[in-house]
Amino acid sequence: MSQTDARAVILERIRAAGASSSAPAEVPPPPPDTVLDESAMLELLVENLRDYRAVVTEVNGPELRPAVDAVLQRHGCRTVTVAPALDDSDRPTDAFTVIEDHGLSSQELDGIDAVVTTSRVAIAETGTVVLDHDGGQARRALSLVPDVHICIVRADQVVTSVPEGVSRLRPSVEKGLPLTWISGPSATSDIELNRVEGVHGPRNLEVILVR
Amino acid sequence: MTTTSSNPNPLADTMPTFIGMPKFPTMAKEALGNTQQRRNLQHATHTIRAKRAAVVGEMNDWEALRRNGADTKDEVLAHLDTYLEQLEAKLVESGATVHWARDAEEANRIVIGLVQAEGVDEVVKVKSMATQEIELNEALEEVGIAAWETDLAELIVQLGDDRPSHILVPAIHRGRAEIREIFRNKMAAVGRPAPEGMTDEPRQLAEAARLHLREKFLRAKVAISGANFAIADTGTLVVLESEGNGRMCLTLPETLISVVGIEKVLPTWEDLGTFMQLLPRSSTGERMNPYTTMWTGPAAGDGPQNVHVVLVDNGRTHVLADEVGRQGLRCIRCSACLNVCPVYERAGGHAYGSVYPGPIGAVLTPQLRGTGSAIDQSLPYASSLCGACFEVCPVRIDIPRMLVHLRTQVVDEHRGTRNAESSAMQAMAWMFADNRRLQKAQRAATLGGKLLGKRTSLGAIPGPASAWSGARDVPVPPKETFRQWWSRTDGGRR
């Protein structure tokens, strides 16, 4: 039988199941979002990021470049990849070899020490950073293959709750952009429930929060 | 053309029973003797349970979130045809190709066709319950396509020729020493061998998996995933994970095939606000899982450019047709019910004879497969009806009520066939029907009590009651009945 048949059969089975009778009269609304003032919200973000083993550096605007350099130095990185669209002010200095991504292969990325990206939204209540991979956020493979991910978050991108974050991301999704939600470095608890950081994703997540 | 209504039980052959699987009590008895497994399970379930309780406790109004989640799912199920059509239209608009599969066989055939069209003989896989349910790996293997599981626990299960025993942590029945042996003996045959001198330290084992799988990720042309959610009003698919193996599969290959159960739809993008809180907190007991990927068709210059979605029924419409049972389709596969279940904690996942173990498995499996086999008839009884599963379920599935409903169904199907239990029940009904018969029977029983002297319980009883008494203490009958006591003491006055 063809695909059209399979589709028709499944839809017909659904209609024959008569489930419309159990439709809720009205879906009760989710609980109201937590509201925090900006300083409390940023504090909560930092606390939750650290709780899931991300390393957080807080800086003022002009301190950003030196902060990026310092993180790279701390991890002993030499090569860094960035999106071509990443602003100069967000990049490491000439002390490092900066490789712009013009279609690097997965194998090439595997040989690079670190990546610097910006982000779209950060959620304080869960310690989550979300990338929609536009502009300086780079395509997905960049923040995945190198072992050190330096992610720049600006204070006005931070929201308190998950539903607030979701609402802010609708425009990105409508543009067809993919999203990556990141809460701490890669981790597994599959062996006797012992948490081990760094299986396949970057083993080091460094968040630089720009106030 | 067959529909659910014309065929009340179309499923028995769509989700294969684990080969030669005996009924639950037989399997459980074996599992209970495995002390290593019982230790692992006790540790695992109690640890995750405590983590879940802590992060759920952080929430202002968890109950309101649950109710919103449950009713959102009910809304989807009530108008599933409309939401699926909307999802399909959005997916197509975003550049994805949509396929429909009535059952496991059809889903597997579609996936095999897509993989063969790419001319490859291997795929990388993100952990997915739907593909386990349809036994996709076995189907791919049959046509010479290697399917590499990339979740660490799934890798342990696959290399060990084993079965998953938990929805979230499928290799939880294995200890570190066993895992080391599996890696040392099995990795070399399918790729990069385990490092020389690898110990059983979890960090070293995880590193071995990282190295072993990285070469597979970097060369893979085709990936296969499931999806935790599919958003109808945007055409977005969502996968939650921890290790980054999901991101590797969803990002690096050229072709991505996602096998999605038709009940995974959510109406709107904003519904994720609720479910991205309910799922991580209920599942791993974290505020948020380390990684989530969301994609809306292929993205220009980023990730797979051929994006396929296979929408699978495989018994779900059959569940949908059952008024009590349909709430099982709210399930978001968090596994919170496994971690609180006293039966699961002791019997382990294998005893349930399907990829869905624990309380949710005990209701979902017999609904998806029908109650034709011994294991599926016994599953609704694999519960003490304590209600803990309902209590923790993030979408308020009333599992105890469904278990009772399924027990009724199993009993009804066997009406007319005699066994020890039904004979005993018939005798009981005859006795209770008449006051004098009951008195006589009770007086007869006290005789037994007098004969047995000071014993308080009987050992195993031979004959038809042996199965029952094998797992329980049978009390010695009392030396006098209540009626005898009442007339001897004048109601306690003498």
Image (tube, grey):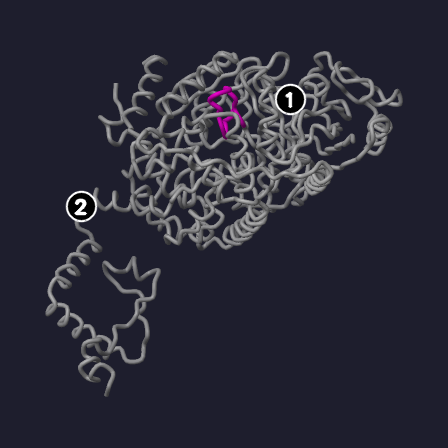
- Identify whether B437 is placed above or below B13: below
Report the front residue among B52 and B352.
B52
Image side of residue A35 versus residue A84, left or right: left
Amino acid type, residue under disc 1 in the picture: Asp
The residue mark sitting in front, 2 or 1, is: 1
Q: Quadrant of residue A13?
A: top left
Q: Tell me which segment is drawn in magenta.
A: B225-238
| Residue B188 in view, yes or no | no
The residue identified by callout 2 is B415
Residue B233 tag number: none
Report the front residue among A104 and B142.
A104
Q: Chain of mark 1?
A: A
Instruction: Give the class, few, some or many, for how many residues have Cα within 10 Å of label 1's Cα (few <14, many ≥20).
Output: many
Q: Quadrant of residue A75?
A: top right
Amino acid type, residue under disc 2 in the picture: Arg
| Residue B451 percent across, percent down from the top left | 23, 79
- Identify whether B129 is placed above or below B302: below
**Label 2 to label 1: alpha-carbon separation:** 59 Å
Indicate whether residue A142 is drawn in magenta. Answer: no
Image side of residue B126 versus residue B406, left or right: right
The residue identified by callout 1 is A132
Q: Residue, x 24% and y 31% (percent of image)?
A: B8
Indicate whether residue B235 is drawn in magenta. Answer: yes
| Residue A131 in view, yes or no | yes
| Residue B156 percent across, percent down from the top left | 56, 37
| Residue A202 percent across, percent down from the top left | 70, 30
